[in-house]
Image (spheres, rainbow, N blue to C red):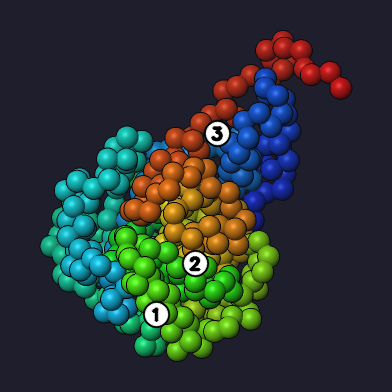
């Protein structure tokens, strides 16, 4: 299915289902608002599904999109680029943190090679969907062509559709790519108008000098790609002020193959009305691109957690999403999204199983 086909299928949350869900919440045997953010999660999923109560968001499927980055050559990460390939092998062997968390919540794990800078042997759980052997250096010009960006987006769409067809009722974003926090920071700058110093973090762990260099590289990438300043960046939550063609050009200029694929994964989930739990800053920056292509996609997303990366908070604020947990995670892989999945399930289970005041014969609070 093409990008244009999927964009045409994405619809906003159902106003009627949202109203029904809020009314149902008010009738449950608990003080109104006593479940805090979980109540809004349940309402959000009802609106996204178009029905109240919403379907239980299980089983869940994690897709880890892997790709390499040309900007790695600028010395923005202390980790060698071959770690991307090595970690893909670790995911497939079941030895990563994401595998452990997935086992804990009963989620399947699919690894997608969308742009690793090496050939990977066939393996169970691996989808070979390579668009290229890593991106170009974003600080010297566009990281991808627009055609490559669209191709990677359509990889993500295809993966989402396949997982849903296989029975997944919740999608969780995952990523792997050494230097991808540099690309993420650049995308956050371009889509939100924030300065690089505000949103560029320390990634997998860098010292002060390397961090200052990383900020400078992000600024250079924005400048050489004609994205500084960013007067067209949307200023309101969920705004569609960035036109679709602009969004594709920004994504191609600054993103990685995994960013584009995750954007497609989010779009594919939204088109299928299956909730998508976003992980950290890579997912957040990809969601900015997805929302610029189809603003209604935000209605179908849940922010699993708030990463320690400053760009993630900026992305979530821009999208109008409230993270469910804040554990100072900065690993990626989908780990934060996986940890949030039981909370999302619990929020929906309340809608299905908790009695109303009428059905339980419990006296309501007096006005």
Farthest residue, direction right: 367
Q: Measuring 32% from the left and 78% from the top, which residue is drawn there?
A: 71
Farthest residue, direction left: 121
Mark 1 vs 2, N-terminal side: 2
* Quadrant (top left, top right, bottom left, bottom right) of the C terminus: top right
Q: Is residue 262 left or right of residue 365?
A: left
Nearest the camera: 335 or 341? 335
Relative image position of residue 123 (x, y in whole percent): 15, 55
Q: Measuring 23% from the left and 66% from the top, which residue is drawn there?
A: 79
Residue 8: in sight, yes or no?
no
For label 2, count other residues whose C-alpha is less than 10 Å away and answer few (under 14), some (14-19) or many (20+): many
Rounded to the nearest angstrom, the CA distance separating label 1 from label 3 is 43 Å
Relative image position of residue 38 (x, y in whole percent): 58, 36
Q: Measuring 52% from the left and 43% from the top, which residue is drawn there?
A: 324
Mark 2 vs 3, N-terminal side: 2
Rounded to the nearest angstrom, the CA distance separating label 2 from label 3 is 33 Å
Q: Name the residue under label 1.
A: 217
Q: Mark 2 points at which residue?
A: 199
Q: Mark 3 points at which residue?
A: 348
For label 1, count other residues whose C-alpha is less than 10 Å away and answer few (under 14), some (14-19) or many (20+): many
**Is 278 rendered above or below residue 72?**
above
Secondary structure, mark 1, is helix
Secondary structure, mark 3, is helix
Secondary structure, mark 2, is helix
Mark 1 vs 3, N-terminal side: 1
């Amino acid at each position: 299915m093409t990008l244009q086909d999927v964009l045409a299928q994405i619809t906003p949350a159902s106003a009627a289902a949202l109203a029904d869900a809020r009314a149902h919440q008010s009738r449950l045997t608990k003080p109104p608002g006593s479940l805090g953010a979980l109540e809004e999660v349940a309402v959000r999923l009802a609106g996204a599904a178009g029905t109240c109560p919403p379907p239980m968001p299980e089983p869940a499927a994690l897709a880890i999109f892997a790709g390499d980055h040309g900007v790695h050559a600028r010395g923005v990460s202390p980790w060698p680029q071959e770690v991307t390939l090595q970690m893909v092998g670790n995911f497939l062997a079941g030895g990563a943190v994401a595998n452990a968390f997935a086992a804990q919540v009963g989620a399947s794990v699919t690894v997608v090679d969308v742009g690793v800078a090496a050939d990977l042997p066939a393996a169970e759980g691996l989808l070979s969907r390579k668009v290229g052997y890593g991106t170009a250096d974003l600080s010297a010009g566009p990281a991808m062509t627009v055609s490559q960006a669209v191709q990677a987006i359509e990889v993500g769409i295809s993966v989402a559709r396949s997982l849903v067809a296989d029975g997944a009722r919740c999608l969780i974003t995952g990523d792997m790519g050494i230097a991808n926090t540099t690309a993420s920071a650049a995308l956050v700058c371009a889509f939100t108008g924030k300065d690089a110093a505000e949103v560029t973090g320390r990634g997998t762990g860098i010292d002060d000098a390397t961090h200052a260099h990383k900020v400078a590289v992000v600024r250079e990438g924005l400048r050489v790609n004609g994205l500084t300043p960013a007067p067209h960046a949307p200023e309101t939550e969920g705004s569609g002020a960035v036109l679709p063609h602009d969004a594709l050009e920004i994504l191609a200029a600054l993103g990685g193959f995994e960013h584009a694929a995750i954007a497609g994964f989010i779009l594919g989930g939204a088109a299928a009305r299956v909730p998508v739990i976003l992980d950290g800053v890579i997912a957040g920056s990809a969601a900015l691109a997805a929302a610029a292509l189809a603003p209604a996609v935000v209605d179908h997303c849940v922010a699993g957690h708030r990463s320690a990366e400053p760009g993630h908070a900026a992305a979530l604020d821009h999208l109008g999403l409230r993270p469910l947990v804040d554990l100072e995670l900065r690993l990626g892989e989908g780990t934060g999204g996986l940890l949030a999945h039981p909370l999302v399930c619990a929020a929906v289970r309340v809608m299905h199983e908790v009695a109303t005041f009428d059905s339980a014969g419990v006296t309501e609070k007096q006005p």
